[in-house]
Amino acid sequence: MKQFNTFLLAVISICSYQLSTAQTGTLCGGNKGPNLLGARGTFSAPFITNNTSAAACLQSGSNTYNPNGNVGNKLEGCSAPSGNIYPCSDYNYTDKSNGMQPEFTYSLLKIMGDASGSNCLHTPIWKAKDHTGGDGSYFMAVNGAPNQGYSPIFYQIKNIPVCTNATYEFSAWVINMMPAQPTTDDAAPNISFVVNGVTIGNSGPIPYDNQWHKVGGQFTATSEIVNLQVINATQIAGGNDLGLDDISINVCESRIVVDGPNVITEGNTVSPQFTITDNTQKNTWYKWELSSDGGITFNDITNGDQATFVNGQYKIGYEIDNVVNQMNGYTYRLVVSTSQSGLSNPDCIFFNDYTLRVASGGPLPIQLSSFDGTYSEGVATLKWQTSQELNNDRFELFRSFDGNNFELAATVAGAGTSYTTKNYSYQDRIASSANSVYYKLKQIDKNGKFSFSSVIKLSLSATTSSFQLFPNPVVNNFTASFTAPRTTTATLLIRNSNGQTVYSKSIDVVKGSNAIPVNNAPLTTGMYYVTIANDDFNFTGKLQKR
């Protein structure tokens, strides 16, 4: 677990500059992780919710600039952070008519004003709306006070866990809400972005063009916690009226490519080669891991060594001697990080896998189409489906209450050989004080050859709102596990790290614990956000595709 007592340490390797939309991704060489800030940086649910008590003239729906649900609830104050990635502001929040007339005030809005006019929050007219638009999120509208006599910090995110020595790309969008240029250019909004006391980006005077502008920079973390501050960089009282939206901090990832034969003949030796590419040349530490159960669990083969980058990359291989049939499906993983300690932190690593396919192993005895489950009132119902079976003797269903130690729960006879769809189910009565139960299937053919399914997780608590994705990282198929308050339908969405939807489908949800399989989604290597939502709940989790 990360320690949260390091505070306000200096950040090294600082580079600040304005970043245009076309340049996005160049800092990390195109390899970057998802936004660490998530919904906190986009001013969206569940961290920002609709303020139903706001003045009617701000959200009456009478015009395009005051739609229903136009105002978001306030941020907390910054004096007592309540956990990791804590967004706050010490400016004065307002949701009243003319509430932003005074300086040192802010609100969270979908629309301040447009071509039809401006809402009653401030007069004369200001124009701005949520940067992304159409996704139900908000932006932060600010009447900036001069940085003399007032706190210059109008927005802050505290306690962001990061990985020591890793390089991060930062970006945010800003807009000048004033429709016309005043008599002096000094009144233009001008804000800076500060990480642990060091400025990493500056907007410069924001033009009077009523357009969103992107500002960015990068930093290398010297501690496991950083604090991001957005500060007023001008002393002018008149003007300095701006919007802030879509704040993002993304780690610069290493790209790992593996090269090796697809099929190995028994008795031979194979040496898969891994190529690590990293523009920052920070992830010099590496270790090897092995899974002998189809990628369900991995154990360390080595403790950690260092490599040297040459022209932004290095190559490393692992020799596997005397391949035998029993090694069919063994998975060898190369893990890289910026430090030896980082190799043991799942948030600070990147990896890729090589899986042995032994020629004498023959075809897999079955094709498993799905494996999922539900839990209600002490009974876990497991269901699975096959599209084809070849000499299938039986299924063994394994249960675990910690995700590591599994025991045999049931044996279900297979269909032998079949070329039609077969459906199976088993009801497992649970008597445990644990919060969750895990299941996996072992399929065994008549010759003793076997394979494992992925692991699914069911919640045993009707009140939990946990959301899990298994396996994670994923090769092709995964399961989303969560608890729903009632039987209904929901939408499952998968978005890439740029926020683009790559997969969507409607799903049926039961009251209690659900495990929803997702098979063959069109994912390429990288990070994704998986969301399952309807009017009752909104779950989002991070998924890595190998």
Image (spheres, rainbow, N blue to C red):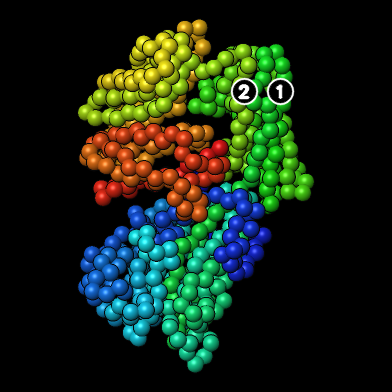
Where residue 216 appears, as percent x and y from the top left, is 57, 65
Res. 373 image quadrant? top left
Task: Find residue 356 and name its label.
Answer: 2
| Most distant residue in the top direction | 447
Q: Within 10 angstroms of label 1, few (less than 14), some, or many (20 or more) residues?
A: some
Q: Is residue 449 left or right of residue 276?
A: left
Where residue 358 appears, as percent x and y from the top left, is 62, 18
Where residue 183 appears, as percent x and y from the top left, is 49, 92
Give me the C-alpha separation between circle 2 and circle 1. 9 Å
Q: Is residue 521 above or below residue 144?
A: above
Q: Residue type at mark 2?
A: Leu
Query: Would residue 204 be seen by someone viewing this image from the given angle?
Result: yes
Q: Is residue 229 above or below residue 522?
A: below
| Marks 2,1: beta carbons within 8 A | yes
Task: Find residue 231 and name its label.
Answer: none
Q: In this view, does 34 lie to the left or right of 75?
A: right
The local secondary structure at tag 2 comes to: loop
Res. 25 image quadrant? bottom right
Query: Would residue 91 be seen by someone viewing this image from the given angle?
Result: no
The local secondary structure at tag 1 comes to: loop
The residue at the point 23 percent across, 64 percent down is 52
- Which part of the image, by quadrant, shows the C terminus? top right
Q: Which of 167 and 273 is in front in this view?
A: 273
Where residue 223 appears, as percent x and y from the top left, is 58, 52
Q: Residue type at mark 1?
A: Val
Task: Find residue 270 and name its label.
Answer: 1
The residue at the point 58 percent across, 60 percent down is 24
